[in-house]
Image (spheres, rainbow, N blue to C red):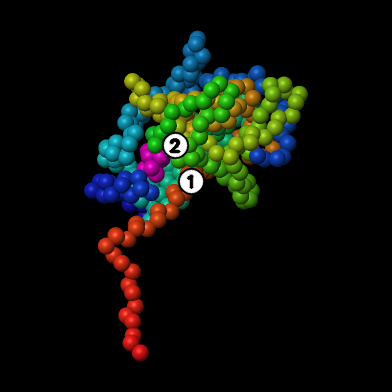
């Protein structure tokens, strides 16, 4: 049974949380230059190339959650956190586990046959160029990571060079689904391949062990990830919550879906983000005034 978390216990909850490639060859059968523009329901592209979402963000777009204290204030306002078990909670369609340090959400296969620039976006975001889409709110994803103690970082690095990847913000991302009752589980990077922009050449797997949780940005219009619906970017995008930290991130014409591994378009999947476990905290040293117990000597 799902039980809403009482607001009286939110401070304790936030405090507790705060302490807390594929080697298979991939064949490209499509033209990297053939990219389908967004339809009217998804949005439009401005003359400058900027994507404009058709549907603006929800009221949580203005979520000013940058610190645990701000996250608590947002929770008090939203009041939609549900307790699922001793260590698991739900925010909308986003589930997180404070012990395992995981964040999980539902998604669907979207693009299989053309160049993609994103691995995961909302259905109101850049779905016309994303491998996966989800109905989960980017604001809920971000709030879950804040409650797990993650601090957003700036997306940096030189052009065509890897991005700095702090261990505290390094994610392992896996995608799970079932086909005819048979479970499948792959690292997200195994579902992406790279091409050298020549369709006649076979693509190669994307070799990427960890992704960067940068946490998007807040601007004068609110929370950018919520507004644009960007969750996992394959190309450099500070608006997205998660970025590809590899040196391939500055080329928007080389990322292909791995058709050999992917299920059919529309297939439901689960996306799991896993943070590194916190190092064990050593016990505090004994006060200096405590001396070891010396056994009593016995006189013979």
Would you name the residue on which mark 2 appears? 136
- Is 1 included in the stretch rendered in magenta? no
- 1 or 2: tag closer to the N-terminus: 2
Query: Residue 198: x and y, percent?
Result: 72, 21
Q: Quadrant of the N terminus?
A: bottom left
Q: Which residues are magenta?
A: 141-150
In the picture, residue 146 is in which quadrant? top left
Pick out the residue farthest to the front.
300
Query: Residue 76: x and y, percent?
Result: 26, 40
Q: Is residue 8 left or right of residue 235?
A: left
Query: Residue 208: x and y, percent?
Result: 60, 36
Q: Which residue is drawn at the image coordinates 57% and 45% (left, top)? A: 176
In the picture, residue 139 is in which quadrant? top left
Pick out the residue farthest to the right.
200
Q: Is residue 60 left or right of residue 189?
A: left
Mark 1 secondary-structure assignment: loop
Would you name the residue on which mark 1 appears? 276
Pick out the residue farthest to the top.
47
Residue in the foreground of this view, choosing between 81 and 168: 168
- The tag on residue 202 is none
Query: Residue 162: x and y, percent?
Result: 56, 29
Mark 2 secondary-structure assignment: loop
Residue 268 visible in the picture: no
- Is 145 included in the stretch rendered in magenta? yes
In this rendering, the answer to whether 36 lies above or below 288 is: above
Q: Which residue is drawn at the image coordinates 45% and 50% (left, top)? A: 279
In this rendering, the answer to whether 240 lies above or below 69 is: above
Pick out the residue farthest to the left.
8
Residue in the foreground of this view, choosing between 10 and 299: 299
């Amino acid at each position: 049974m799902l039980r809403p978390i009482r607001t009286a216990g939110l401070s304790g909850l936030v405090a507790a949380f705060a302490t807390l490639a594929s080697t298979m060859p991939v064949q490209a059968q499509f033209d990297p230059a053939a990219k389908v523009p967004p339809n009217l329901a998804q949005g439009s592209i401005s003359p400058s190339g900027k994507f404009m979402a058709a549907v603006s963000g929800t009221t949580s777009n203005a979520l000013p959650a940058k610190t645990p204290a701000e996250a608590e204030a947002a929770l008090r306002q939203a009041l939609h956190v549900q307790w699922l078990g001793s260590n698991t909670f739900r925010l909308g369609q986003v589930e997180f586990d404070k012990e395992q340090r995981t964040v999980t959400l539902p998604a669907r296969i979207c693009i299989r046959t053309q160049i993609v620039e994103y691995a995961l976006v909302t259905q109101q975001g850049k779905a016309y160029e994303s491998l996966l889409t989800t109905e989960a709110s980017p604001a809920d994803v971000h709030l879950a990571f804040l409650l797990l103690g993650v601090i957003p970082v700036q997306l940096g690095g030189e052009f065509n060079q890897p991005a700095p990847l702090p261990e505290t913000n390094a994610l392992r991302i896996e995608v799970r689904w079932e086909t005819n009752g048979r479970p499948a589980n792959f690292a997200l990077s195994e579902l992406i391949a790279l091409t050298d922009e020549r369709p006649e050449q076979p693509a190669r797997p994307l070799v990427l062990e960890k992704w960067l949780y940068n946490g998007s940005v807040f601007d004068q219009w609110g929370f950018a990830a919520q507004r644009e619906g960007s969750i996992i970017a394959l190309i450099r995008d500070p608006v997205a919550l998660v970025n590809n930290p590899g040196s391939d991130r500055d080329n928007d014409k080389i990322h292909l879906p791995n058709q050999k591994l992917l299920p059919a378009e529309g297939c439901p999947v689960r996306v799991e983000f896993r943070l590194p476990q916190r190092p064990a905290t050593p016990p505090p040293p004994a006060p200096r005034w405590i001396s070891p117990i010396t056994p009593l000597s016995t006189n013979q």
